[in-house]
Image (cartoon, grey):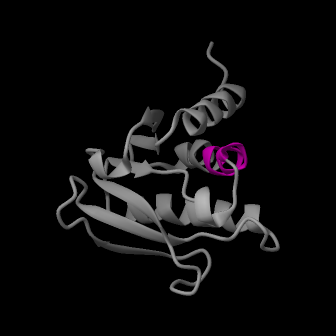
Amino acid sequence: MDIQLLRADIASLKVDAIVAPSDPQALQAGRAVVVTGGNLLARFIIHVRVPNGTDDDADAKLLAATKAALDRAEELAVASVGLPAIATGPFGFTSERCARVMLPAAIEHRARSRSLQRAVFCLFGQKEYAAFERVLGELQPQS
């Protein structure tokens, strides 16, 4: 599974599924719910519960949400999934902190990936993109 970074709006991404944050009250932690993509280019939207950055074990909860989203993508047998920095903004994670949790989950998922060929981290701003690029470079240095 390739891990790619793209600076764009997630709604414009042409992938099989996109991941979207859900209200913490709407879902049980570690669960992912799938709905159709409607008018989006993606066929599916995978909703995951995103913790507030000040929650106890917030990093572990975000890690579980990211893993759940990737697992649901595999269950849907899709080839590509788009992931925004789901815990930034109102959830209180910095871009750097979000990258340090989400990227290792994607890297670890490679070993058990079946249908997923691409995980595209769709990052809206330059600062967000730069943080993910820096962390990805640390986690998987170019040979």
Q: Residue at x 53, y 83 (%)?
A: 27
Can residue 79 be seen by looking at this rendering? yes
Residue 59 percent across, percent down from the top left: 75, 61
Q: Residue 56 at what x, y percent from top left?
A: 82, 73
Front residue of 39 and 109 = 39
Rendered position, 3 above or below 40:
above
Q: Is residue 38 above or below residue 97?
A: below
**Residue 116, position in %: x, y?**
39, 47
**Quarter of the rendering occupied by the N terminus:** top left
The residue depicted at 69 percent of the width and 68 percent of the height is 61
Position of residue 111 in the picture relative to residue 18 (left or right): right
Give the overall secondary structure of the magenta segment.
Answer: helix
Q: Which region is colored magenta? A: 95-104
Residue at 65% across, 35% down: 131
Q: Is residue 115 visible?
A: no
Q: Residue at x 53, y 66 (%)?
A: 68
